[in-house]
Image (spheres, helix red, strand yellow):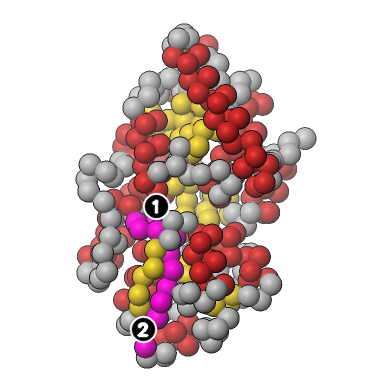
């Protein structure tokens, strides 16, 4: 039976895994590129975020399951930086032999390009997307001292409101800024470098609101230390059924974090088929299903083609919202 690692175990093992991965890279470079013999040694799975976060844990759960089907180790390589852009660009430049994969966050493709230059942006067309993984919803939470119990309390406050986001060019920032524009609420954006410090700021009332991923916020919601005001998914989240969506509350802000596994563009079809089969076997396992439930992730196990279509549609929608409301994701508008 598969047992996925805890957050603490992940952090403790990260340096050892990185060393293994670097060694594996050297072996792959000198090995055969015959796709009929795939995999030719370890399959490196790169994550553009630090160990212990949601994206990293998902990668490790996938690695644990896929390793069994592929018959080769799949070491997770953490290379944080630029919201995942550094790692993604590096993998896109690797040989298209299936020995190097990356876990893509949708926000890197759909939102970050609205906040960076064209040279810095990551293009999904540089990858062969193998399959979608899951949906990680954002929730707007209020500090205990803010006095906000519903979104109506926020819109009726009649004053400037401080809000924290998980960083520049993220789904958190986009959702919060579009919501305030549509609701005609004056606010001050305080970007953090991830969800944890943003949530900590709400707990300490350094900001009154924050938009963070549900898995990070749920322990504090259950403890009564923060109040959930709404979720930004298309439909109510099954893990927080009593909290309305932004859409229900009258605001067109459908923003969630989606993730997918991708390989460099031009990866042979038989290699992609083997990778897809390994992912699908993982999806069916009880251990992986339990992992999703424990981390409040909604399965979105769609084909690579569907991922590309949906993410491009979201990118166009987000671009139109930013333009409509004259929002800057790298400034103060």
Query: At which x and y percent is residue 276?
Result: 53, 31
Instruction: Pick whichever, 29 or 293, lies toward us.
Output: 29
Of discs 2 and 1, which sits in the foreground? Answer: 2
191 drawn magenta: no
> In the current view of this chain or complex, which residue is farthest to the right?
1
Q: Residue at x 46, y 26 (%)?
A: 100
Query: At which x and y percent is residue 57?
Result: 59, 44
Kindly identify which residue carries mark 1: 107
Q: Residue at x 22, y 48 (%)?
A: 117
Classify 10 Å Cα crowding around label 1: few (below 14), some (14-19), many (20 and above): many
In the rendered image, the vertical position of residue 119 relative to residue 199, given as above or below: above
Dividing the picture into quarters, in which one does residue 316 lie? bottom left
Q: Residue at x 52, y 77 (%)?
A: 205
Instruction: Pick whichever, 230 or 187, lies toward us.
Output: 187
Quarter of the picture containing the N terminus is: top right
Instruction: Pick whichever, 7 or 127, lies toward us.
Output: 7
Q: Which mark is first along the chain, 1 or 2?
A: 1
Secondary structure, mark 1, is helix
Dividing the picture into quarters, in which one does residue 269 lie? top left
Kindly identify which residue carries mark 2: 160
- Does residue 68 show up? yes
Query: At which x and y percent is residue 253?
Result: 39, 68
167 drawn magenta: yes
Extent of the magenta region? 159-171
Name the mark on residue 63: none
């Amino acid at each position: 039976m598969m047992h996925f690692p805890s957050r603490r175990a992940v952090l403790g093992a990260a340096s050892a895994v990185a060393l293994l991965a670097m060694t594996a890279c050297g072996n792959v470079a000198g090995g055969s590129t015959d796709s009929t013999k795939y995999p030719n040694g370890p399959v490196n799975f790169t994550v553009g975020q630090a160990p212990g976060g949601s994206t990293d844990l998902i990668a490790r759960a996938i690695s644990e399951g896929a390793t069994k089907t592929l018959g080769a180790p799949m070491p997770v390589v953490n290379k944080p930086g630029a919201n995942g852009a550094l790692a993604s660009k590096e993998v896109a430049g690797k040989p298209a032999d299936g020995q190097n994969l990356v876990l893509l966050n949708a926000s890197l493709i759909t939102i970050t390009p609205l906040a960076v230059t064209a040279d810095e942006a990551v293009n999904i067309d540089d990858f062969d997307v193998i399959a979608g993984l899951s949906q990680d919803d954002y929730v707007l939470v209020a500090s205990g001292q803010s006095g906000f119990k519903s979104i109506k309390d926020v819109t009726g406050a009649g004053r400037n409101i401080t809000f924290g986001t998980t960083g520049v060019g993220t789904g958190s920032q986009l959702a919060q800024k579009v919501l305030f524009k549509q609701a005609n609420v004056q606010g001050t954006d305080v970007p953090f470098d991830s969800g944890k410090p943003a949530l900590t700021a709400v707990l300490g009332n350094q900001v009154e609101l924050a938009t963070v991923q549900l898995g990070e916020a749920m322990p504090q919601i259950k403890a009564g230390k923060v109040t959930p005001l709404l979720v930004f998914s298309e439909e109510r989240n099954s893990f927080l059924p009593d909290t309305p969506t932004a859409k229900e509350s009258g605001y067109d802000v459908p923003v969630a974090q989606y993730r997918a596994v991708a390989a460099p563009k031009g990866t042979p079809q038989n290699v992609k088929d083997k990778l897809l089969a390994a992912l699908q076997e993982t999806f069916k396992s009880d251990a992986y299903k339990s992992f999703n439930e424990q981390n409040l992730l909604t399965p979105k196990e769609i084909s690579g083609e569907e991922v590309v279509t949906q993410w491009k549609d979201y990118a166009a929608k987000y671009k139109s919202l930013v333009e409509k409301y004259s929002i800057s994701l790298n400034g103060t508008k």
